Image (cartoon, rainbow, N blue to C red):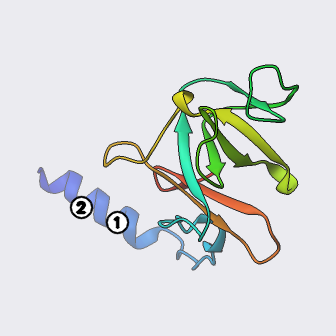
Amino acid sequence: MRPVVALALLAGIALSPPVRAQTFDFTRQTPVRANSPGLECRQIQEVIEVRQAPNPAAPRISMVASHVAITGPAVNGYLPVELTGRRPGWVLASQTWPNTRVKSCFVERQRDGRLLISVFNRIQ
């Protein structure tokens, strides 16, 4: 590096105002890395329907994308899920996939009952 450029850089650093320390709250950004008891997070490829019961004739109660919180074993090819506000529902098991080393998500129940979901170590 040329001496003139180095001197200019050092002068700029010396004359810059002091940096003030900032306080950040990272409590909501801590990745969830384990499922709460009785819950399993599964990812989905596209927007899928949530049914009221485990059959295709049951009324659709919601649509979900990205991930779902599974609450039990499959029945008739459908998995039980928990939606926002603890509403139960059912999704096709074939439209979800369990965690792998490449694709993973985790769901944790908070003290107030809300579900906190982490996908690829980012809070959703």
- In the image, is residue 45 above or below residue 117? above
* In-front residue for pair 53/89: 53
Graded by Cα atoms within 10 Å as few (under 14), some (14 to 19) or many (20 or more), the crowding at tag 2 reads few
- In the image, is residue 17 above or below residue 47? below
Q: Amino acid at mark 2?
A: Leu
The residue singled out by tag 1 in the image is 11
Q: Position of residue 115 (x, y in %)?
A: 72, 61
Q: Position of residue 71 (x, y in %)?
A: 66, 55
Q: Position of residue 59 (x, y in %)?
A: 88, 25
Q: Quadrant of the rendered structure where residue 54 is?
A: top right
Q: Amino acid at mark 1?
A: Ala
Q: Secondary structure at mark 2?
A: helix
Q: Quadrant of the rendered structure where residue 51 is?
A: top right
Residue in view at x 61 percent, y 76 percent: 22
Graded by Cα atoms within 10 Å as few (under 14), some (14 to 19) or many (20 or more), the crowding at tag 1 reads few
- In the image, is residue 22 above or below residue 120? below
Separation (CA) of disc 1 from disc 2? 6 Å
Residue in view at x 54 percent, y 65 percent: 35
- In the image, is residue 59 above or below residue 85? above
Instruction: Name the disc covering residue 7, or none.
Output: 2
Left or right of residue 10, residue 117 in this image: right
Whether residues under marks 1 and 2 lie with C-beta atoms below 8 angstroms apart, the answer is yes
Q: Residue furthest front?
A: 76
* In-front residue for pair 85/15: 85
Q: Position of residue 89 (x, y in %)?
A: 78, 42
Residue in view at x 32 percent, y 43 percent: 102
Left or right of residue 103, residue 101 in this image: left
Q: Secondary structure at mark 1?
A: helix
* In-front residue for pair 40/101: 40
